[in-house]
Amino acid sequence: MKVLIVEDEQHLADGLRFNIEAEGHEVKVVGDGAPALEVLESETFDAIVLDVMLPTVDGFEVAKTLRERLDYTPILMLTARGRPEDVLLGFEAGADDYLPKPFDLNIFIARLNGLLRRRRWTRHEAKAAKTGRQISVNSRTIDFENLELRNGTELIPLTLMETKLLQYLIDNEGRAVSRKEILEDVWQLQEDTDTRAIDNFIVRLRKHLEDEPNNPKIVQTVRGVGYRYVNPA
Ligand code: CA
């Protein structure tokens, strides 16, 4: 599979390249956000390892721009240690997973392989018969394996985290879940992070699922608690 590394620290980029190539993958390295976006216009990758702190165009901007282009290549974001708020900013920008620096190379490879595995399933299943898990909500179909939502003829790609959040809400159907629970269970974040970032994800889910996103019936706000999923069917 093909992996793009966007990292300006040459030493780290070389180490990552060495280890990813040792796993049998093809690697390309760029040192800033602008060349990354340029390369991604003409080449397809199976995953992107994206550093947040880059010389001119940062990792958040790269992720955001890609998702705006409807490019849903899985992104593993490398965040700075001691900046938990970057994790949520990264997910908001469209990252699929993150790793705080400095990290253990074995953990890095495990996370990257997780994204690549999902990518491989996605590709195979898109071609094979649709046996993936699908559910219907409000006459939309959500495909949890292929990370997409169908609304009539419209096909909306979902990010891994949007899908995970939706799955979590559905698993807790009828129950009010707090923002803190969501952060811990979906994002595996224990830190005392600003939980308002969750709200941006909820806004996006409502846009996809609700007839009137401003008057939500499916992903309801529970004042003083958090959110509750109710399937209208
Ligand atoms: Ca950097």
Image (cartoon, rainbow, N blue to C red):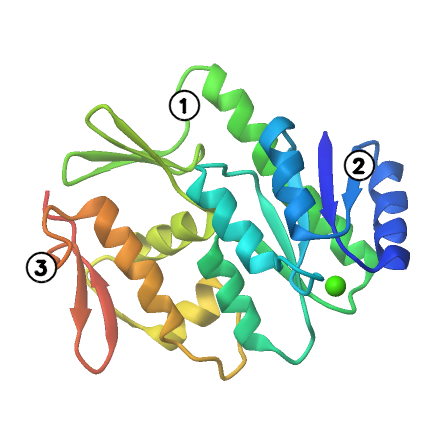
- Residue with the mark numbered 1: 131
Tell me the distance, in whole angstroms, between the alpha carbons under discs 1 and 2: 32 Å
Which secondary structure, mark 3? loop
In the shown orientation, is residue 216 left or right of residue 52? left
Mark 2 crowdedness (10 Å alpha carbons): few <14, some 14-19, many ≥20: some
Tell me the quadrant of the picture where the N terminus can be found: top right
Q: Are marks 1 and 3 in contact (CB under 8 Å)?
A: no
What type is the residue that disc 3 sits on?
Asn
In percent of width and height, residue 92 lies at 44, 60
Query: Camera-side residue: 171 or 100?
Result: 100
What type is the residue that disc 2 sits on?
Val
Which secondary structure, mark 1? loop
Q: Is residue 104 visible?
A: yes
- Residue with the mark numbered 2: 27
**For residue 121, above or below residue 88:** above
Which secondary structure, mark 2? strand
Label located before the other in sequence (3 or 2): 2
Occupied quadrant, residue 98: bottom right
In the shown orientation, is residue 183 left or right of residue 210? right
Q: Is residue 96 visible?
A: no
Mark 3 crowdedness (10 Å alpha carbons): few <14, some 14-19, many ≥20: few
Occupied quadrant, residue 102: bottom right
Q: Quadrant of ligand 1?
A: bottom right
Q: Indicate yes or no: mark 2 CB to ligand 1 under 8 Å.
A: no
Tell me the distance, in whole angstroms, between the alpha carbons under discs 3 and 2: 46 Å
In the shown orientation, is residue 211 left or right of residue 191? left
What type is the residue that disc 1 sits on?
Thr
- Residue with the mark numbered 3: 215
Label located before the other in sequence (1 or 3): 1
The residue sitting at 57% across, 51% down in the picture is: 62
The residue sitting at 46% across, 44% down in the picture is: 67
